[in-house]
Image (spheres, helix red, strand yellow):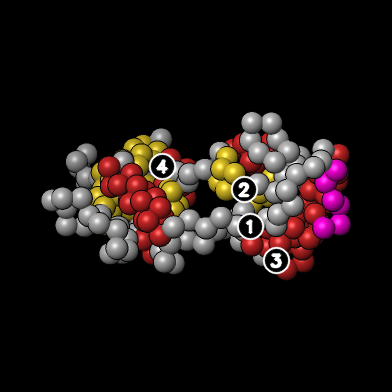
């Protein structure tokens, strides 16, 4: 076990140095579907750097919750993200620090998802967007509110809501990552009310029966 910890944690330190040197952002921003930015935040695939009870052995590729990896495994250097660069570096470290336990020697390999599994994830994310309602609370422009001709005139926001704001809120509230290009929003949302923002998603994602296009419901309330 001690040797696993030595080579595993040393490998992680080398990975962190290598990442900083190359300014590689692939750890934080994984490849998104067809450059469209659609991704459902499910469990992460990680490579263990040491044996962990009820989870796996050093070098195993396992799935864990994002929070568990971020708050427990990564700070303690117990696991790294499941990408080619990390798998290669961990394998190289294992050649230097050989485990003392008698077990089968094998290279660490990145487990690839099948296209069918990926399409199921994308469809699940698209359905979640289409069925959900994004609720935003924002401050109104008090001066313009007082200057309204009638009380029936819409209340304008102090700061209009842009595509980037909606993208951030979709990630926070719905746990789905999209890109600004996925939203058809010619101009920012500037008043309180309810909106239905058309979504631009890949045609390969099948629409539910009876629907013509994907959309995202957005409700803006006063703060």
Q: Which numbered circle lies on residue 174? A: 4
Q: Earlier in the sequence, mark 3 or mark 2?
A: 3
Whole-angstrom CA distance, mark 1 to mark 4, is 32 Å
Depicted 102 relative to depicted 188: above or below: above
The N terminus appears in which quarter of the rendering? Answer: top right
85 relative position to 160: left or right: right
Q: Residue 139 at what x, y percent from top left?
A: 42, 41
Judged from the image, the secondary structure of the residue bearing numbered disc 1 is loop
Marks 2/1: CA–CA distance: 8 Å
Mostly what secondary structure, the magenta segment? loop
Q: Are marks 2 and 1 in contact (CB under 8 Å)?
A: yes
Q: Please tell me whether residue 172 belongs to the stretch shown in magenta.
A: no
Mark 3 or 4, nearer chain start: 3
Q: Which residues are magenta?
A: 95-100
Task: From the top left corner, tell me how far across and down residue 70 is, in percent.
Answer: 64, 41
Label whose residue precedes the other's in the sequence (2 or 4): 2
Residues at discs 3 and 1 in contact (Cβ within 8 Å): no
- Kindly identify which residue carries mark 1: 109
Q: Which residue is mark 2?
A: 61
Q: Residues within 10 Å of mark 1 (few under 14, many from 20)?
A: some
Classify 94 as above or below 174: below
Q: Does any portion of residue 144 appear in the rendered image?
A: no
Q: Earlier in the sequence, mark 2 or mark 1?
A: 2
Residue under numbered circle 3: 23
Question: Distance between the Cα atoms at labels 3 and 2?
Answer: 25 Å
Q: Is residue 132 visible?
A: yes
Spatial distance from mark 3 to mark 1, Cα to Cα? Answer: 24 Å
Quadrant position of residue 133? top left
Mark 2 vs mark 4, CA separation in Å: 27 Å
């Amino acid at each position: 076990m001690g040797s696993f910890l030595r080579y595993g944690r040393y490998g992680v330190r080398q990975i962190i140095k290598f990442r900083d040197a190359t300014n590689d952002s692939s750890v934080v921003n994984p490849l998104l579907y067809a450059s469209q930015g659609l991704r459902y935040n499910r469990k992460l695939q990680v490579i263990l750097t040491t044996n962990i009870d009820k989870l796996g052995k050093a070098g195993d590729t396992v799935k864990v919750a994002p929070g568990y990896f971020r708050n427990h495994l990564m700070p303690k250097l117990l696991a790294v993200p499941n990408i080619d660069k990390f798998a290669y570096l961990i394998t190289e470290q294992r050649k230097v620090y050989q485990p003392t336990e008698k077990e089968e020697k094998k290279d660490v390999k990145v487990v690839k998802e099948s296209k069918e599994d990926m399409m199921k994830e994308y469809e699940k994310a698209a359905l979640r967007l289409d069925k959900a309602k994004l609720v935003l609370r924002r401050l109104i422009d008090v001066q313009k509110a007082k200057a309204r001709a009638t009380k029936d005139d819409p209340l304008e926001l102090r700061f209009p809501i842009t595509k980037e704001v909606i993208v951030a809120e979709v990630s926070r509230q719905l746990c789905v990552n999209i890109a600004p290009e996925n939203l058809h929003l010619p101009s920012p949302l500037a008043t309180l009310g309810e909106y239905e923002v058309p979504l631009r998603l890949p045609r390969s994602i099948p629409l539910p029966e009876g629907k013509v296009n994907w959309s995202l419901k957005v409700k803006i309330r006063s703060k």
